[in-house]
Amino acid sequence: MQQHLTTYQKEKFLPILLERDGSNCFYCNLPFNPLDPNMRRTFDHLNNDKKFNDIQNLILAHLFCNNKKKHNAEYQIMAKEKLRLNSLLVFEGLSERERNKSGPMPANQEIDLNVAIKKETWAYLQEHLVRQEKPAINFNDSAESIAFMFWERTGHGSSQTVGRALKEFTSTAAPFKREEEGGEIVIRKRV
């Protein structure tokens, strides 16, 4: 069994990973920068086993974040949850016959799940901050609430995945923002 991803595997997996997970670092959600050695894109093995080169075990991360994961409990939890979700989606999307075959996993179900989670997250923000006109909502509680509601509806739900969607919807280009208030992170509508 090979130790590292081949150039062929990297070229084959890169468009799938970009479509599945987006074009930023999985851990910090910042863009890649090939001119900065620490910010360049690397393939990270979620379970740290470089021999397990199935696409469900791979994400894109900065070199710095990939190395930081070794000593960062939050990144390790994110990686474990992502691998669990990837594996669950792959298994549920395959027929009994296909489950017994080896080969790359289809990414379409995870993409559909990510789109659905983003829609649920968007609807939640619209409901609480626009329609109900609340001044702010707690970031972590929102992520857990949305994940629970999504789980009730679909049988799937990850507060880490929802948290990534919330970060996108509170980026500088988005209509919502994150602020610290009383030691907590809250989400507000931009004025």
Image (cartoon, rainbow, N blue to C red):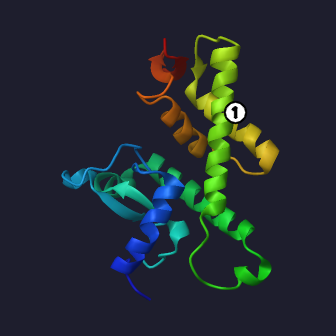
Percent of width and height locating residue 92: 74, 66
Question: Total number of numbered labels?
Answer: 1
Percent of width and height locating residue 23: 42, 51
Q: Choose between 168 and 66: the one closer to the eye.
A: 168
Label 1 Cα neighbours within 10 Å, binned few <14 / some 14-19 / many ≥20: some
Examine the rendering and report whether any part of residue 183 can be seen.
no
- Residue with the mark numbered 1: 145
Left or right: residue 88 versus residue 49 is right
Residue 102, image quadrant: bottom right
Secondary structure at numbered mark 1: helix
Residue at 49% x, 16% y is 190
Q: Choose between 181 and 62: the one closer to the eye.
A: 62
Residue 101, above or below 29: below
Q: Choose between 103 and 77: the one closer to the eye.
A: 103
Residue at 73% x, 39% y is 148
Examine the rendering and report whether any part of residue 68 can be seen.
yes
Q: Choose between 66 and 24: the one closer to the eye.
A: 24
| Mark 1: amino acid | Ser
Percent of width and height locating residue 174: 48, 27
Left or right: residue 132 versus residue 184 is right
Residue 161, image quadrant: top right
Residue 12, above or below 116: below
Residue at 73% x, 73% y is 94
Percent of width and height locating residue 70: 37, 57
